[in-house]
Structures are given as C-alpha cells and as structure tokens.
Amino acid sequence: PLTRGRASVRLRATKEEAKVLKLCDEYPVNTKDPDFLEEVLTAAKKLPDAPENAYELFLGDWKVEWSTLGGKAVKKEADPNAPPMNLKFVSFTALPPVPVEFTGSLNRVTGTLESGTYQLL
C-alpha cells in the first residue's frame, strides 16, 4: 500500500502482480534456489508497464515483500537456520557491528522530480 501521512491508499494487484506476490509469500527465506529465482524473474518480466504518474505513486512508505538479499522480507517467524546479519553492514556503517535478525522492513521514498531520498527503515 502507498502511505502518505496518515492516509493510506490500497491498490488492487493485477493478475501479474498477484503472481509475483504469491511467489514472494510462498518461498522461504533462502534465495539460493535457481529454479525459484528464474520463476520470480519470469513473473516480474510480465508485470505491466508503469503508469505515467508512476513517480508520484512511488513516493511514500512501502512494506518490503521480498528481497534478493534475503528472500521473503517479512517472516512469520524467525528462521533458526538463517545466519544473523551484521547491523553495521546493513546500515552502511552508520551503526555498530551487532548481529541482528530482521523480521520485516519498510522503504521510504521522499522527494520531487528533481531530487529525493530512499531510506531503508
């Protein structure tokens, strides 16, 4: 969903978008399976083109569903086999080197057509 301030807009997924979301929800944390990665990339290539107002829609807070860095981004429970991540690495050296496990994340996009910021929350 796209969030602006306290208002939230929920957009309905197209058939192609629903396929990508379903794959993200079904696949475990580990992204090393080449068959799965190929399936996700094939599904992603079928996504519709962005609308003309895509940049305006991109601004806001976004829940991360899946990442090539760690698979499903919002885990229902901790994976006991997953190694912890180094907080210093994921914070681009801004925080101390403490082992952490993420159970979810958000991306925040702010700005104008001329400039903007992308934050990992």
Image (tube, rainbow, N blue to C red):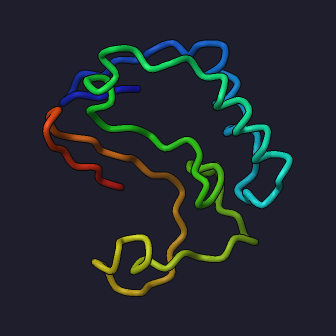
As drawn, 13 above or below 85: above
> Foreground residue, 48 or 78?
48
Q: Is residue 35 left or right of residue 118?
A: right
Q: Is residue 18 left or right of residue 49?
A: right
* Residue 91 at x, y percent in the picture: 36, 71
Q: Please report the residue visible at 51 percent of the width from the left and 81 percent of the height from the top.
A: 99
> Foreground residue, 102 or 69?
69
* Residue 77 at x, y percent in the picture: 65, 55
As drawn, 18 above or below 75: above
Q: Is residue 120 left or right of residue 68?
A: left
As drawn, 25 above or below 94: above
Tell how many labels.
0
- Which quadrant: the N terminus? top left
Q: Quadrant of residue 94?
A: bottom left
Q: Please report the residue visible at 41 percent of the width from the left and 87 percent of the height from the top.
A: 97
Q: Residue furthest bottom?
A: 97
Q: Quadrant of residue 15?
A: top right
Q: Please report the residue visible at 35 percent of the width from the left and 55 percent of the height from the top.
A: 120
Q: Residue furthest right?
A: 35
* Residue 8 at x, y percent in the picture: 31, 22
* Residue 74 at x, y percent in the picture: 56, 48
- Which quadrant: the C terminus? bottom left
Q: Quadrant of residue 79?
A: bottom right
Q: Please report the residue visible at 55 percent of the width from the left and 41 percent of the height from the top.
A: 65
